[in-house]
Image (cartoon, grey):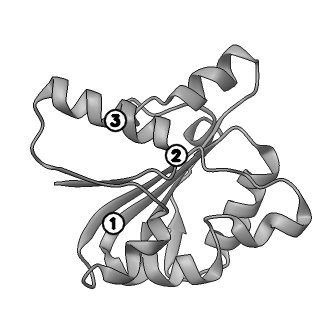
Amino acid sequence: GYIGCEPFLNGVAKLLTQVEQAKLANILLYPDDARDVLPRLPPQSLSSVYVLFPDPWPKLRHHKRRFIQAGTLDELARVLKLGGEVRVATDHADYARWALQHLMADIRFRWTAACAADWRVRPADWPPTRYEQKACKAGRPCVYLRFLRV
């Protein structure tokens, strides 16, 4: 099954419509921040976590609101199975650096990139998003990071 977390009402409404149209029964949707859900999950209960185009909170005083933080990484390490994945996609260069810095500094996660194409080209098994489409249309390059729980 899948757990989707979306704090914005329009995103929730669109997702609910798509779930209903596809007649999917294995999706649980939480209409708020994923950081509220993580502490409630059992240890090693997730195979993967996708952080797709999160709010980059570009102002320095707002960086504490970014999803990728030490506390969130603690929760992700707890709920991910060994070998599980954290996937992060962003079109914001500073957020990409931030995510890389935090995830690479944490010994519980290992970056899987072997060459630049591994993080510059969207892998076929990553779901496209509206924010990704907007970034591509505006000519902003996207970054696709994949880390394993070790």
Q: Secondary structure at mark 1?
A: strand
Q: Is residue 52 left or right of residue 81?
A: right
Please name the residue that numbered disc 2 is placed on.
Answer: 8
Q: Is residue 149 left or right of residue 53?
A: left
Are circles 3 and 1 on residues that touch, CB within 8 Å?
no
Residue 23 appears at what percent x and percent y? 10, 30
Q: Of discs 2 and 1, which sits in the foreground?
A: 2
Taking depth in this image into account, of 36 and 132 the one nearest to the observer is 36
* CA–CA distance in space, label 3 to label 2: 11 Å
Please name the residue that numbered disc 1 is placed on.
Answer: 84
The answer to whether one can see residue 125 in this image is: no
Taking depth in this image into account, of 61 and 16 the one nearest to the observer is 16
Taking depth in this image into account, of 110 and 45 the one nearest to the observer is 45
* CA–CA distance in space, label 3 to label 1: 25 Å
Q: Which mark is residue 27?
A: none
Residue 110 appears at what percent x and percent y? 52, 69
Residue at left 24%, top 83%? 42
Q: Is residue 30 left or right of residue 140?
A: left
Name the N-terminal-most of marks 2 and 1. Answer: 2
Are circles 3 and 2 on residues that touch, CB within 8 Å?
no
Task: Specify the amino acid type for callout 3.
Answer: Leu
* CA–CA distance in space, label 2 to label 1: 27 Å
Please name the residue that numbered disc 3 is placed on.
Answer: 15
The single residue placed furthest to the top in the displayed view is 137
Residue 100 appears at what percent x and percent y? 68, 62
